[in-house]
Image (cartoon, rainbow, N blue to C red):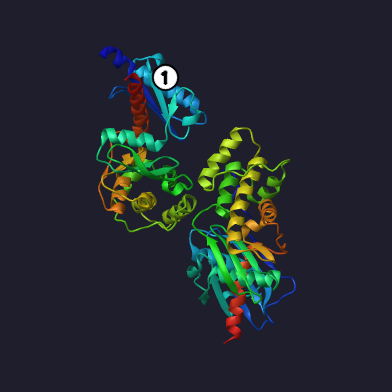
């Protein structure tokens, strides 16, 4: 079996200092994306557990798998969670969710919680879409722009290049920064054409890191254009899987002339965190 | 005098496409030979190989050629042509020769698609190109066929057996590939997926055509025109009949060869 370079690692996290047994409000958010699924469990508005899993062919199975992983070893069961909100591309397929919310609202709310109330612009770089969201001091959506039609600038597009260059997706960012001089960005927007262009560059004798730099730069330029259309305001944060790619984040910051707040948690959980917080609000307003 | 002209009128048209390079050797209005080779990474080499092979088939030497005209993506890189023309100019010239009533032409190549309007005198009036997105180009079909693990011909045959119960939500080739994989896993009949694939690209090509306005008759050129399922999907999408010339993939090369003839006879006159 050949190595699958796009295959990022799944994992689970449990808070060392939060227990559910004495919690008043236990809520969960499940974000079923096109590429990854996250389940987040919160106890009285504090992060209790989360799991990040690849989305399989069945959204309900993916949602259940992520939820069960998050709960594993905690003694908590799905039935004991007071309210569950589903979000993301496959949100209508979360069988155990009480309600669904759009991922725009959830990402805004999640970023507000994770990075603080000063966040005004959230860039969510997901598996199959890219959203620029403006939020207010309460974490509510003011405006948003989205590209969900085209793989350029998305995680799926990055996976295609990881496979082509045979570089594990988690190492792409670092490697792309190991260039003496920043090359010109690849000229094709379309991932399919960019792939041919990258092959041509390799044939011309370019090194993998140089091709990666050229591709990452093109991705950063494309996403920067989306952000400029909506207008970027501080504080600026990046959520989603690509936020973990230092090569793209660095180039995007340079292009925009604005630094993104660095997270101390997984950038992929913002949507599910937002969903769990919205669930908590629903319980409180009852 | 007549004999002299006949010898002088041997021309070649070469279409250096992103995927395939095609040559037509023309004697007046008669095709003596046609050849195709894969372009690969060296368009110049592919062009030379195709030209040499076509001349061998025609039993002629390179010196016999009065003029060589190139077209296609690699046209400027080909040193053996005295002149080059755009794909649209070449296609329009060939269609004016083969199907003079055609007013709207669609050329779907491996990596780009073009729609153009042709005047009664064969001149190009307007055109639109998609070279930015693979969704409306041949590579879209190739990618989907590979995902379905069938050949393009098999995918076309499959699509003709389907009822049209399934549609693809994604336009993007990369996303559509994931969608097709999901459909396969959901036990969707391959025939239905194949039909949805053709409907998807037909919608992209039709929207390109609508940008310039569609006027009958409509012709489809490029290798994809061999696919009965694609032609059917496009006819359905446009709600009108589509002409497909014989050897639709050689239209660019034929047009280039005809333009070579035109300029030789003009200079000779």
Picture quadrant of residue A243: bottom right
Quadrant position of the C terminus of chain A in the picture:
bottom right
Indicate whether B129 appears above or below A273.
Answer: above
Picture quadrant of residue A40: bottom right
What residue would you read off at disc 1?
B52
Which residue is drawn at the image coordinates 32% and 39% (left, top)?
A: B226
Which residue is drawn at the image coordinates 68% and 46% (left, top)?
A: A176
The percent coordinates of residue B55 (x first, y second) are 37, 18
Q: Nearer the viewer, residue A33 or B37?
A: B37
The percent coordinates of residue B179 (x first, y second) are 45, 55
Residue B134 appears left or right of A8 = left
Quadrant position of the N terminus of chain A in the picture:
top right
The percent coordinates of residue B211 (x first, y second) are 38, 52
Picture quadrant of residue A211: top right
Indicate whether A83 appears above or below B132.
Answer: below
Q: Is residue A29 visible?
A: no
Determine the chain carrying the residue at label 1: B
């Amino acid at each position: 079996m050949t190595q699958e370079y796009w295959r990022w690692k799944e994992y689970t996290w449990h808070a060392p200092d939060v227990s559910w047994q004495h919690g008043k409000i236990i809520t969960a958010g499940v974000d079923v994306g096109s590429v990854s699924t996250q389940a987040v469990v919160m106890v009285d508005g504090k992060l209790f557990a989360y799991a990040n899993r690849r989305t399989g062919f069945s959204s309900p199975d993916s949602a259940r798998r992520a939820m069960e992983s998050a709960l594993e070893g905690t003694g908590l069961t799905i039935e004991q969670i007071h309210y569950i909100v589903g979000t993301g591309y496959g949100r209508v397929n979360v069988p155990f969710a009480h309600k669904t919310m759009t991922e725009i609202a959830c990402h805004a709310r999640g970023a507000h919680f994770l990075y603080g109330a000063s966040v005004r612009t959230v860039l969510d770089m997901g598996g199959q879409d890219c959203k620029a969201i403006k939020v207010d001091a309460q974490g509510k959506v003011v405006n948003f722009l989205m590209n969900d039609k085209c793989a350029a600038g998305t995680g799926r597009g990055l996976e295609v290049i990881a496979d082509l260059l045979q570089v594990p997706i988690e190492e792409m960012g670092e490697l792309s920064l190991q260039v003496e001089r920043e090359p010109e960005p690849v000229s094709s927007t379309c991932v399919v054409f960019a792939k041919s262009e990258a092959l041509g560059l390799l044939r011309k004798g370019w090194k993998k890191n140089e091709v990666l730099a050229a591709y990452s730069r093109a991705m950063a330029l494309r996403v920067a254009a989306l952000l400029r259309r909506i207008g970027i305001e501080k504080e600026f944060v990046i959520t989603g899987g690509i936020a973990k790619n230092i090569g793209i984040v660095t180039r995007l910051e340079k292009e925009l002339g604005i630094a993104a707040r660095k997270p101390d948690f997984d950038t992929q959980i913002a949507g599910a965190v937002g969903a769990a917080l919205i669930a908590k609000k629903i319980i409180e307003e009852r | 005098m007549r004999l002299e002209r006949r010898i002088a009128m041997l021309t070649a048209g070469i279409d250096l496409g992103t995927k395939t390079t095609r040559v037509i050797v023309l004697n007046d209005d008669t095709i003596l030979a046609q050849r195709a080779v894969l372009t690969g990474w060296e368009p110049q080499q592919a062009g030379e190989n195709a030209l040499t092979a076509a001349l061998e088939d025609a039993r002629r030497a390179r010196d016999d050629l009065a003029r060589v005209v190139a077209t296609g993506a690699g046209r400027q890189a080909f040193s053996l042509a005295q002149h080059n023309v755009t794909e649209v100019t070449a296609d329009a010239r060939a269609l004016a020769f083969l199907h003079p009533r055609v007013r709207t032409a669609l050329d779907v190549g491996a990596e780009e698609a073009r729609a153009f309007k042709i005047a009664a005198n064969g001149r190009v009036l307007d055109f639109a190109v998609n070279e930015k997105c693979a969704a409306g180009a041949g590579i879209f079909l190739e990618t989907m066929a590979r995902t379905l693990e069938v050949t393009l011909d098999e995918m076309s045959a499959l699509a003709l057996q389907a009822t049209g119960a399934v549609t693809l939500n994604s336009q993007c080739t990369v996303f559509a590939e994931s969608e097709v994989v999901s459909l396969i896993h959901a036990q969707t009949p391959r025939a239905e997926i194949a039909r949805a694939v053709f409907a998807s690209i037909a919608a992209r090509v039709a929207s390109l055509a609508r940008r310039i306005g569609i006027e009958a008759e409509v012709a489809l050129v490029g290798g994809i025109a061999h696919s009965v399922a694609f032609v059917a999907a496009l006819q359905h999408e446009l709600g009108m009949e589509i002409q497909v010339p014989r050897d639709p993939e050689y239209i660019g090369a034929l047009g280039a060869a005809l333009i070579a003839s035109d300029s030789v006879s003009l200079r000779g006159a």
